[in-house]
Image (cartoon, rainbow, N blue to C red):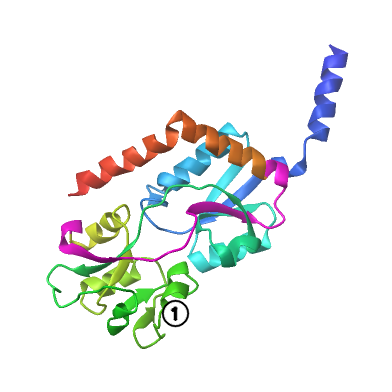
Amino acid sequence: MFVRMALFVMLAMLRPAWAESMTIYTEHFPPYQFIQEGKVVGINAELIMLVCERAEVDCELELLPWSRSFQLTRQHKLSGLISTARYKEREQQFKWVGPLVKSTSYLYRLKHRDDISLTSLSDATRYTIGIQPNDIYEAVLLKHGFEKGKNLLNVSYKNADMQLFIKGKLDLIIGSPLTLNYQIHPLGFAFDDLVPVLEFPLDVQGNYLALNAAFPEPLRERLQWTLDSLRVAGDVDSLIQKYQVAQTAMN
């Protein structure tokens, strides 16, 4: 009995400090992550918390504005950020676990705006779009000739562009079939009120959990292995289905 207790204490002392807990920052962006009844829920929020549970890591989700979440993840070793687009310019800024769930993005117009017709993103410079500063979409738009303050309006928070779009103060909006219904429904509109006019050219590997660059590699590997296992078991598809059902109920 004494030997068993001594072994237990020794193993507890040898357990790495980084395995105790971590904070995962995110923003309001349904259905990937959002607040419901005081709790952070959503496809990727629930997926990551399931990963943490199965990997036996104590994770806390904290929902903040995107810029603040991004900054805190860069500052704190035991932290991560969802849902983060992974692309070349960001590759060395973080360590990565994923991919999580994502959907193809398009440029949309309102149904009655049949004056808008696009064959390329450069064509879209004739119209106005809103985007958060430092968003991946902003970098792409700037590369294709958009100018801040002219045809590219920076908004302070996610979905602020949708409100301006619905009021006719923006011509186009960027979104996906998976996300837009959640954004437009609270404003009294339906997804059918929107028309996709161009697939958005986005060279990314998908949505990921972006970890601080100094995050312990053995723990990152454990999280990745657990995510891969959940995908094989069908848990990822089940979460997508759960929120697609909820989306259908809105219409």
Instruction: Give how far across and how far down residue 239 sits, in percent.
Output: 38, 38
Q: Which residue is mark 1?
A: 142
Q: Residue at x 15, y 78 (%)?
A: 115
Task: Please report the bounds of the magenta region as a residue range.
Answer: 190-219
Q: Residue furthest front?
A: 119
Residue kind at label 1, given as amino acid type: Leu
Instruction: Give how far across and how far down residue 36 sits, in percent.
Output: 37, 48
- The answer to which of 12 and 80 lies nearer the viewer is 80
Q: SS for tag 1? A: helix
Residue 125, picture quadrant: bottom left
Q: Residue at x 57, y 47 (%)?
A: 60
How many badges with numbers are in the image?
1
**Depicted 44 relative to depicted 163: above or below:** above
Residue neighbourhood size for the residue with mark 1, other residues' Cα within 10 Å, grouped as few (<14), some (14–19), many (≥20): few
Q: Residue at x 35, y 88 (%)?
A: 150
Instruction: Give how far across and how far down residue 15 sits, in percent.
Output: 78, 35
**Depicted 28 relative to depicted 172: above or below:** above
* Residue 20 shows in the view: no
Is 131 positioned to the left or the right of 194 in the image?
A: right
Quadrant including the N terminus? top right
Residue 46, picture quadrant: top left
